[in-house]
Image (cartoon, coloured by chain):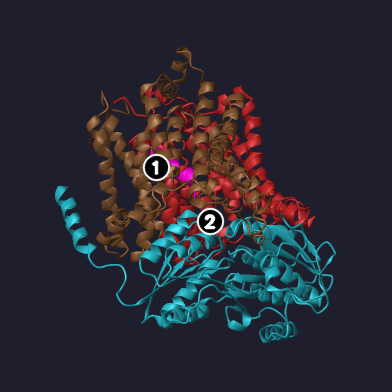
Amino acid sequence: MEMAQNIILTIMTAATPLLIAAIGELVVERSGVLNLGVEGMMVIGAVCGFAAAAVTGSPWIGVLAAIVAGALFSLPFGFLTLSLATNQVATGLSLTLLGVGLSGLIGEAFVGSAGLRLQSIAIPGLVDIPLVGRLLFGQDPIFYMSIALTAGVVWFLFRTRAGLTLRAIGDSHGSAHALGISVIKARYLAVMFGGACAGLAGGHLSLVYTPQWVENMTAGRGWIALALVVFASWRPWRVMAGAYLFGAVTIGQLHTQALGFGIPSQLLSSLPYLATVVVLVLISRNRRLTMMNTPASLGRPFVPDR
Amino acid sequence: MRLQLVRRPQHSSLMAAVSPLIAFALTLIIGAIIFIAIGKPPGAALYAYFVAPLTEMWSLHELAIKASPLIIIAVGLSVAYLSNNWNIGAEGQFIMGGIFGSLIPIVFPGFQNVLTLPLMILFGILGGMAWGAIPAFLKTRFNTNEILTSLMLVYVAQLFLDWLARGWLRDPQGYAFPGSIRFPPAATLPEIAPSQGGAHYGLVFALFVAVALWFVMTRTLKGFEVRVMGASPRAGRFAGFSSKRMTYFAFLLSGGLAGLAGISEVSGAIGQLRETISPGYGFTAIIVAFLGRLNPLGAVVAGFVLALTYLGGEAAQISLGISDKLARVFQGLLLFLVLACDTLIYYRVRFSAGRKAGEAA
Amino acid sequence: MKSIIFGFATALALTTAGSAFAADKYKACFVYVGSKTDGGWTQAHEAGRMQVDAELGDKVETKFVENTPEGPDAERAIERLAREGCGIIFTTSFGFMDPTLAVAAKFPDVKFEHATGFKTAANLTTYNSRFYEGRYIIGQIAGKQSKKGVAGYIASFPIPEVVMGINAFLLGARSVNPDFKLKVVWVNTWFDAGKEADAAKALIDQGVDIITQHTDSTGPMQVAEERGIQAFGQAFDQIKAGPKAQLSAITDTWGPYYVKRIKAAMDGTWKGGESSWDGLKDGILTMAPYTNMPDDVKAMAMDTEAKIKSGELHPFTGPVKKQDGTEWLAAGAKSDDGTLLGMNFYVEGVDDKLPQ
C-alpha cells in the first residue's frame, strides 16, 4: 500500500509543474492569445526562484521571485503581440529562445550551489486520513497552490463577470471591443497571469522537484504544458486530468523498465508523446465539442480601429 | 503616454526595406550595452560575432554548411505558415528524412553507382513527407491541432533514430558504439569546391529551392491559392479551393523539404547516420522563416544571418571567452526586434497622452 | 539619436583593437560537449583545464568551446581552434571522434587528443579512464550496505562504457553478497535532473535501497537524501547534495593527465597514434571520501582500492558468466581491454535485458 502511495506521490510531483503552467496558458488562450513562450518563462522562473532562494536563504522568497520573474518576462511578449500586433507564434518562439539563453546567463553564478527545498506542509488531522491523507494533505505548498489555482480559474472563468468578459474577448475580440471592453488591457493581464503561472511552475522545478539549478532544467516541460491545454480542449479540470495522466505515463514507463521486461527504453520513453497524440485525436474527433470550447480569436492579432 | 497603432492605407515599402536594418542596428546597440555590462570590449565582441566569421574562406564554407539546412527547411515552412498550417515539427521530418535516405547506403552497402545519391535524396524527401503527412492526416480527418501533433512527433522521431542508430543500423565494426557505417563516396554529397572548404551541394539545393518556391509563390496560381487560403479559408472555398488539399500540400511540401535537408546533412556534412543528426535545425528554421518574413528569398538572407550568430558565438567564446549563452540571447533579441520593427510596415505608431478615446469608443 | 549611434561606432572602433591570444604562450585548447558548469562530465574536464591554468599558467594559455553539438558543429569548432593557433586540442566527448579525425588529417602539425574513442592517427591519440575500477569498489560497498540486496542503477545510453560500469558494479556487489540483484533504468539522457530523479523514485518504490547512476545530475542524490536511502555520486563529489546519503563518489580528475600531456607536447616527447587508458593508480579517477558507512565497510573499500592500484585485483577476473549463463571468463582469467571497450553483454545477475 505504501508503495502505491509513493508511486502516486511521484506522479503528482511530476504533474504539478505541468498543471500550473498549463492552467496559466489556458487563461492566456481563453483570452485569444497563443503564447508559445511557456518553456522560456518557465526556465526564467526556475532560475530566478533558485537564485532568490539561494541569496536570501528563504525558499518562500524564491517562490515569490519565480512568480514575479515569470510575469515580468511575459511582458516583452505582451508588448510585441498586443501593442505592436506581431505574429504570436513567432514572438512566442523567440521568447522561449531568449528565456533559455538568458536563464543560462543568470544562472552561471548559481550552478552547483546547494539548493533549498521548499518543505512540505502536512495539514494536521487531515493528513492521517487512511489511504488518501498523505497524498492530498501531506504535500509541498506548490501542490496546494496548483489545486487552488485550478479551482480558482474554474470559478473565475465560469462564475464571474470578469471571466465571462475574458472568454468573450477570446471568442470575438471585435465584438468585445464594440461593446466597450478594453481588449488589449484584458489580454495584457491574461498574458501576465500566464507568465506568473509558468514562473511558478519553473520555481517548482528548482525548489521542490529537484532543488538545484541546472541549465535548461525545464527540459521541454513547457511544451508539454502547451499540449495539455489543447488536450483538455480549454477546460481547467481536464487540464488537471491530463497533467496527471501524462505524469502517470512518464513515471509508469520508468517502473516498467525497472521491472526488467526488456522493452526498448526508447519505445517506452516515447509513450507519453504518443499518448498525447492519441488523446488529442480522440478529443478532437468530436468536432462540435472542440469548436464550442476553442477560443475563436486564438492567435489572431487585434488592433483597435482607432 | 500611450502607444497607438494606426493602420497604413497601404503597406510602406520604405519601411519594408528599412525595418530589418533598424532591427539589426538595435540588436548591435543592445548587444554592445550587454558586452559593456559584462565587462567585455564591445567592439571586439561585435567584430568577433558578426565580422570575423566572414573574413576567411574556410569560415564562409562553414557558414554555408550551417545555413543550408536552415534555409531548405525554412523555405518550406514559409509556404506552410502562409497557408495557415502550423508545422512546428520540421525537426522530426528532418530526422525521418535522414533515416530514410540513409537506409540505402546502410542496408545495401554494395549498391554504389550514379543512382545511389539521387535515390537517397528521393528517399529522404519521401521520409520527411511521410512524417509530415501524419499531422496533416490527423488535422484533416479528425480536426486535431497540428501544432501539437507535429511537435509530439519530433520526440518520437528522435527516439526512433536513437533506437535505430544503437540497434539495427549500427556499424557492426563499431565496438558496440552507436552510429552507422561511414558512407562510401558514392553515397556522399560532394563538396562544391574541395580546395577551399567543406561546403557541399546542400547549398545548391537551398538556393534552388528558395528561387523555385519564390517563383511558385509570386508567379503561379498555386501561390495565389496558398495566400488566399491562409488569409481567409472562407474566401478560398468560394474560389473553389479545398482547405484539406491545402493542408496536405503544406505539410507534404514542408515535410519533404525538411527531409531533403535531413538527408543532405547526413550525406553531405556528417557522412554517417548518428544517434543525433540535428542540433535543433528544425526549430531554428522556424525562426529563420519568420526572420525572412515568410518569403522564400528572405529565408536565404535570414538563414545566413542566423548561421552567422552561431559561428560568431563560437568565435567570441574562443577569442574573448564570452559565454555561448549570449549567442542564444542574441538570436532571440534579433528576432524580437525584427518582429517589432515589421509592425512599422503595416502601421504607423502614434504616442498619445493620457487616457485615450480609442478604447472607450 | 544619430549622435548616439555615432558615439557607439566610435567606441566600437576604439575597442576593436587588442584581443585574442597573448603572444608566445603555448596554446592548449578544449572542446566540451556540455556546459562547463554541468556539475558532471564537462565540469570535470573544466576542472582539469583550470588545473592546467594553475600549474602551467605562466607558459600555457588555455581556450575552450562549450556546448558543442556532435557532428558538423564539432568539426567546425575543432577546426577553428586549430586555425587559432592551438598547439594541442583535447576533444572531450565520444561523439567528437570522427570530427577530430577529420580535422587532425587537415592539420598535421597540431596535436589532438580525443577522450573515450577508438580511432587514432599520427597526430591523434585517445585517452580514457578506467571508471570501472571505481564502479567495482562502489559495488562492493553496495553489497555490504544494502539490507535488501538490491540496488538500482540509473543508466544513460547503452554504450560499452555504461554496460561495463553496470557489470563492474554487479561483480563488486556479488563479491561480497553472491545473491545481489541489480535493477536498471535507462533514461536516454546524460543530463535531465527531473527525469533522473523520477527514475530514482521509481527504483526506490520498487524496493531498492541503494541508488547509483551513470548520468550526470545530482537529482538522484537529492532523492536518496530525501527518502533516507544511500547513493553514490557520479563524476563529481556530490556530498553537498546528499550529506547523509552519499557513500562515496567516482570523481573524474583529468587535471594531472592534461598537465602531463601538455608538458609532453611542449618539450617534444608527445607521440601520436597511442591509446591511453589510465586508472585509479594514475590518479585520473579518485574516490570521494568513504562516508556514511561502518568502519569495517570503509576498511574493505580502502583495501580494495589499494589492491586495484597495486594491480593485485582486476575487477573483471573469472569465473564470470554472461547473463545467459554461458561462461565468459574461466576461473582466474582476466578480461582483455578490447572486450571491455566493446562490451555489449551483461554478466549474470542483472535484472534487465540489454537494449540492442
Q: Is residue C261 above or below residue B26?
A: below
Task: State how many labels appear.
Answer: 2
**Disc 2 chain ID:** A
Residue A3 at x, y = what percent? 77, 56
Q: Give the colour in which the image draws chain A.
A: red
User: Mark 2: which amino acid?
Assistant: Met
Task: Tell me the SS state at disc 2.
Answer: loop
Residue C156 or B119: which is nearer the viewer? B119
The residue at 36%/60% (across/down) is B315
**Would residue B176 be visible to someone looking at this image?**
yes
Residue corresponding to mark 1: A77
Q: Give the colour in which the image draws chain C.
A: cyan
Q: Which numbered disc flags the more N-terminal residue, 2 or 1?
A: 1
Residue C110 or A84: which is nearer the viewer? C110
Q: Along the horizontal axis of the image, is B129 left or right of C265? A: right
* Farthest residue, direction front: B113
Where residue C239 sits, quadrant-wise, is bottom right
